[in-house]
Each structure stands twice: as C-alpha cells, then as structure tokens.
Amino acid sequence: MNKNHIYTAVLAVIILLSLFGIYKLIKSKQGSQKGRPAPQVIIEPVGEEEIIWTYEAPGRVVSKYQVKVLARISGYLTQSYFKEGDYVKAGQNLFKIEPDEFSNAAQVAQANVKNIQAQLTYAEKQLKRAQELVKNDYISKAQHDEMVAKRDSLVAQLASAKAANSDSNRILGYTDVKAPVDGRVGLITVTLGNYVSPTSGALTTINSMDPIYVTFPMDTADFATLMHTDKDNNSPRKVELYFSGGTKYELDGTQDFHDNKVDETTGTVTMRATFANPKNILLHGEFVNIKLFSNNKIKAPIVPQVAIQENQAGKYVYTVDDNNIANLTYIKTGIQSGDNWIITDGVKVGDRIVVDGLQKVVPGSAVQEITPEEKAKMVAIEEQKADKKKKKGNK
C-alpha cells in the first residue's frame, strides 16, 4: 500500500469520527432540552376596560376662506395700502386703481339725474295747472293728455338716470380694491404702475386665520367604529392637535363635519375639525397630527404593561393555549391606562397571556403555570438561601 492510500484512509477515519462526535453532541443537547423542565410563569387572562375611543391621523391645516383678490375694472394700479404678510380686516383698502375716468362718468351720470329731475318738476307743475284749465274747457283734453304723457316719460327717464348713476358709483367704488374677509395677505403678484383688468388674475390672496380648519382622512373601518360607538350622540367631538415635532397645540378643536362619501381611490372618509387660532399660530397648508376622541365610551381589551415586549417587528405578548404552549403574538396598542395598555389588535378579552417569567419563555414551547402566591413563596425561599449563604461566607 502506498503512502497516498494510507493518508486517504486516515483522513476518512478522522472525518467519520468528527461527524460521529457532532452527532453525539446534537443528540446530547436535544436530550438535555427534552429533559429541561418547563419554565414557571404567571398567566392572566386579557382584561376589559371602558375607555373613550381615540383615533390618530395626519392632518392638514386649511383656511376657512381662501380668497383671490381680483380687479373688477380695468385701469392702472396707483396705490397699495399694505405689506405682504399683513393681517387685514374685511372692507380694508388694499389697492387703488386710477379713478379719474370712472369719477368723471359718475359726475356725468349724477348731472343727468339732476337735469331730468328739474324737467320732471317743471312738467308736474304744468300738469297741475292744466288739470284746472281742462275742467273749465280752457284747454283741450288732448293737450292735457299730452302733458300727462310727457310727465310719465320724464318719470321713466329719471328712474333710468338714477339707475345709471347708481351703476357708475358702483363702478367708481371698484377703484378701491378692498379685502373681502379678515385674514393674512399673501404675495403681491402685480406691482404698482401696471395695467390691470378682471382678466389679469389675482392681485394677491387672503387666507382667513381664525377660526381655521384641519382636514384628515379616516378609513371606513374606523369610521364605522366611531359611528357605532357614538350612535345617537353625534355632537361635536374633541380633537387634539400636535405639530410635527410632537408639541401639542394649546387649544383643543372640535370635529364638526365629515364628508358624505367615501373616496374611491383611498377608501377613506374626509373628516374636518375646527380650531380657534387667535394667535395665528396655525398656517394654511401646514401638516400636523390629530387625535380624535369619541363622545361615548367603548369596551376594549387591556394588557399589563409588564406583559408587553418589543422587537424590530413590533410589540408582542406571549399567549398560552389550552396545552400550555406559549406563542409569540404581535399586538397593536392604543392609549395607556394606568399600568395597562389598551389593545386595538392582536388579542381579545379572555385570551391567556404570560405576565411574569417572560425571560424564560421559548416561543412554541410549553410553560408551567404558577400562582402569584407560589411565586412569592419561591422568591422568599431563594432569598433565605441567599441570606444563609451570605452569613456562612462571612464566618
């Protein structure tokens, strides 16, 4: 037998021995695991509590009034009475359009009214005299009727002249471009000296500030829960607002409107809350977070905070089945209630969960249930042993 065959045989024996050793190690570990007693844990059923149902969602601040300020007549901008970003009141002058042309037209219209009024006054006096003369046959009935017709014509002309005068004054008033609502003025898009007309587009925009709206979506399942919870109590609901940094807005709002349809693309219902904004802190277009509170209470599962653990996938508890097998179950939590968390998904009332001894639990393995009293006795015994050991060590 040559050396190569000897080396090959030796290598084969070494590999076989290694594989046999690994096999024995695995079997030894499996045997130790099978022989290991089930960890002792305290198990409690998931409880129930009446709570105010809450819903959190992203929202957007929307002005109650969003007004584009337009020129209603044509002319040159001659004056501006505000700065961009100013807060203005309804009726406050914002711009001046050159008024001369419209002022002259108004004066002509007014003069026309006075002229016709004078003619009508004279015609009425003439008619009054004619009425006496026709009684005594000093003038003919035809002459009298002609005077009546002239008087009636002047009455109609006066009405038309007054309407024209009123219209010319209305148009003259448009030379003062006024704020239609209270609010904050945006950028000026047309500067002084430019010629503007009703087709020129917005001169600037005004967004009302107080009160102000926040709109937010609610999926149909949560909307159904809210409607079922409040039933007939659909009065305005309390809403809290939180800025992107997590800071709470100092004033609470009220949810006082929801749309009458479901958005087909998102499957949500648009909700709206109204907030007082006396310090103009909330700005149109700002993204915020809201928390909506139901008017009525709802029963919900609760789990002790000590029973909840968390990993990268989320929060979870150990549920225990009828065979005392512990299973890792992911949950969703709502608000905190004392030492408990409200559970919105994952477990239901009556489910058995591990509340003590969690560090010893292996998912999918059996556990041994003990009572809190038994656990207390075990702890007391361990403490006594530790004390004896300590005293013995001191001697």
Image (spheres, rainbow, N blue to C red):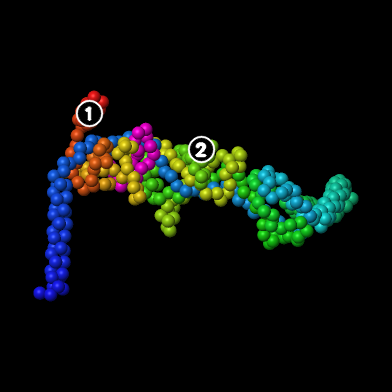
Q: Quadrant of the C terminus?
A: top left
Q: Is residue 376 above or below residue 118?
A: above
x 60%, y 44%: residue = 209
Is disc 1 surrounded by few (<14), some (14 to 19) or many (20+) residues within 10 Å?
Answer: few
* Range of residues picked out in magenta: 330-348
In the rendered image, is residue 340 in sight? yes
Which mark is nearer the camera, 2 or 1? Answer: 1
x 72%, y 51%: residue = 177
Sequence order check: which comes first, mark 2 or mark 1?
2
Q: Is residue 387 above or below residue 352?
A: above
Residue 372 image point, x, y percent: 23, 31
Is 268 on the left or on the right of 33, as rendered? right
Is disc 2 surrounded by few (<14), some (14 to 19) or many (20+) residues within 10 Å?
Answer: some
Residue 341 image point, x, y percent: 35, 38
Is 248 on the left or on the right of 278, as rendered? left
Reading the image, the residue beneath label 1 is: 389
x 24%, y 28%: residue = 393
Q: CA distance from mark 2 to mark 1?
A: 61 Å
Q: Secondary structure at mark 1?
A: helix
x 67%, y 59%: residue = 201
Reading the image, the residue beneath label 2 is: 252
In the picture, the disc for residue 293 is none
Dominant secondary structure, magenta:
strand
Task: Give the camera-side residue of 164 and 327.
Answer: 327
Residue 391 image point, x, y percent: 24, 25
Residue 298 image point, x, y percent: 35, 37
Task: Give the camera-side residue of 9 and 267.
Answer: 9
- Assess whether residue 151 is covered by the magenta stretch: no
- Label 2 amino acid? Asp
